[in-house]
């Protein structure tokens, strides 16, 4: 541990939400964000770290270039099956933690750190969404005592081991208020704070799709909207910035998603799982452990709307819906398609799809394992995929899943999915039996003025 006087970085007081930019470590590694993860059981899960009480985990979210599948299988057929497993990379890269204390002191922790990588990507192409796990050789309690209750700033850096004079590319480490009590009341006694995480926006060419999404979920109790800007029209960006400036009723976070690879085809779905997992951790660190608020995070796309059903819909919003299901770590909503082709649309991605005018859907309700979307309590989750949690903090076993991974019944809520269906892999979707479903419109009765007012923010 090295300590000397220093000056805190000039960007310490800038917003963490707007400053994240991809940082190149090498041709094979790019990193985006970092979080101090001191949750119980986390380090104990790693088979690569002995004496876990002597280490603290800095979780770095990034992209890793993966050799072609054919090449890996040729070397070792079983190696591809283990490609996502945590693996040590300390022989190729180093990591260090830099702490700027409130008194101006700078503390550097670089000796005996362990660096691993674990891939969370579902569809691996040239690059894959990856956690780079920097296990710093100083235990959680020592880190807490070092930081104390002061306004300390933490940074992490990675560097190739074979490059001399490599500069410190410091990445801000975000963290929870570690000086607060961790005691919480049961969910029924807490105020639920609901946030939504959305995949990077790309090609959203009309305000209608985006504005009706924001309008609906705001009426349903969502307080914070997390957007990642990849490629959007000036009109859409202006709308989001105006929402962000309102500040009082809608809390909007808009982050740049400046993908570092030269070709977006090298990434699965524009690296969206890296964005969604960054959003997961961003919401987790916002949850203050010394109050009775419970953060719940919803993962949906802008054409997906979770709708209370039957007798549950009258006066119901997502906050009440969540409160009715008891304790959970993951809560899934099953999918039904409201195809544009059923509702007078021409099936093109740019045609309008007004959720208040489309009442025809497929009769089939998809299973929870296929096309569902979900809500989570972020403190219990390590990583998410597109349709479900991929790793929980606690070990995954049938008893745990039965108790904490729940699926909403069709009588409680469904997820209305408004999209063109001709391009779906299930070629028979447009041939399936359809039914009329006006539940969403009935839910909005009496709220249309509020719904419209949010839509027309200019």
Image (spheres, rainbow, N blue to C red):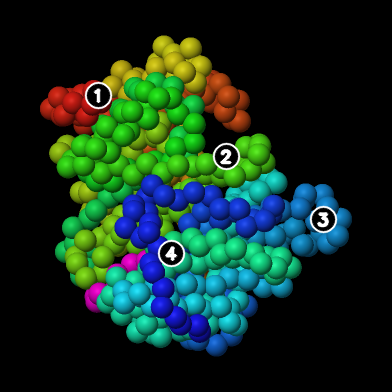
Residue 393 position by quadrant? bottom left
Report the side of 189 relative to 114 (left or right).
Answer: left
Give the label, 2 or 4, closer to the camera.
4
Decide which of tag 2 and tag 4 comes sooner along the chain: 4
Residue to which mark 4 is pinned: 173
Give the CA distance from mark 3 to mark 2.
24 Å
Location of residue 340 with respect to 123 vertically, above or below? above
Q: Residues within 10 Å of mark 3 (few under 14, many from 20)?
A: few
Give the CA distance from mark 2 to mark 4.
26 Å
Residue 456 location (% of width, % of height):
23, 23
Give the residue drawn at x 51%, y 79%: 109
Residue 204 position by quadrant? top left
Give the CA distance from mark 1 to mark 3.
54 Å
Callout 3 touching callout 2 (CB < 8 Å): no
**Range of magenta residues:** 175-183
Q: Quadrant of the C terminus?
A: top left
Decide which of tag 3 and tag 4 comes sooner along the chain: 3
Report the side of 351 relative to 168 (left or right).
Answer: left
Decide which of tag 4 and tag 1 comes sooner along the chain: 4
Give the label, 1 or 2, closer to the camera.
1
Q: Residues within 10 Å of mark 2 (few under 14, many from 20)?
A: few
Residue 73 numbered tag: 3
Give the CA distance from mark 3 to mark 4.
36 Å
Residue to which mark 2 is pinned: 269
């Amino acid at each position: 541990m090295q300590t000397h006087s220093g000056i805190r970085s000039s960007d310490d007081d800038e917003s963490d939400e707007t400053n994240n930019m991809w940082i190149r470590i090498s041709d094979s590694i790019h990193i985006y964000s970092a979080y101090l993860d001191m949750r119980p059981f986390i380090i104990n899960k790693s088979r690569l770290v002995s004496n876990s009480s002597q280490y603290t985990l800095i979780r770095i979210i990034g992209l890793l270039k993966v050799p072609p599948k054919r090449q890996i299988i040729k070397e070792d057929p079983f190696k591809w099956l283990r490609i996502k497993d945590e693996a040590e990379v300390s022989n190729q890269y180093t990591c260090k933690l830099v702490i700027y204390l409130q008194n101006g002191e700078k503390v550097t922790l670089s000796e005996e750190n362990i660096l691993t990588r674990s891939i969370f990507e579902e569809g691996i192409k040239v690059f894959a969404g990856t956690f780079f796990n920097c296990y710093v050789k100083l235990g959680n309690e020592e880190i807490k005592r070092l930081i104390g209750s002061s306004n300390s700033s933490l940074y992490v850096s990675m560097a190739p081991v074979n490059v001399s004079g490599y500069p410190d590319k410091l990445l801000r480490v975000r963290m929870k208020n570690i000086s607060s009590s961790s005691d919480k009341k049961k969910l029924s006694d807490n105020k639920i704070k609901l946030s939504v995480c959305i995949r990077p926006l790309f090609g959203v060419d009309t305000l209608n799709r985006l504005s009706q999404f924001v309008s609906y979920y705001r009426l349903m109790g969502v307080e914070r909207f997390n957007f990642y800007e990849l490629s959007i029209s000036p009109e859409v960006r202006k709308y989001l910035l105006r929402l962000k400036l309102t500040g009082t009723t809608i809390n909007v976070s808009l982050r740049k998603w400046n993908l570092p690879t030269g070709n977006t085809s090298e990434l699965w779905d524009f690296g969206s799982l890296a964005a969604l997992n960054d959003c997961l951790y961003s919401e987790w660190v916002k949850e203050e452990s010394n109050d009775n608020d419970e953060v719940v995070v919803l993962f949906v796309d802008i054409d997906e709307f979770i709708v209370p059903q039957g007798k549950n819909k009258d006066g119901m919003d997502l906050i009440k819906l969540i409160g009715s299901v008891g304790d959970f770590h993951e809560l899934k909503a099953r999918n039904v398609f409201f195809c544009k082709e059923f509702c007078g649309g021409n099936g093109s991605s740019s045609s309008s799809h007004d959720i208040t005018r489309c009442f025809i859907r497929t009769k089939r309700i998809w299973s929870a394992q296929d096309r569902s979307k979900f809500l989570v309590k972020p403190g219990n989750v390590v990583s998410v995929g597109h349709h479900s949690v991929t790793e929980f903090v606690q070990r995954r076993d049938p008893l745990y899943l039965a108790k904490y991974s729940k699926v909403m019944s069709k009588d409680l809520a469904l997820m209305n999915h408004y999209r063109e269906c001709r391009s779906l892999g299930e070629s028979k979707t447009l041939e399936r039996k359809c039914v009329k479903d006006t539940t969403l419109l009935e839910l909005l009765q009496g709220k249309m003025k509020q719904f419209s007012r949010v839509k027309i923010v200019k």
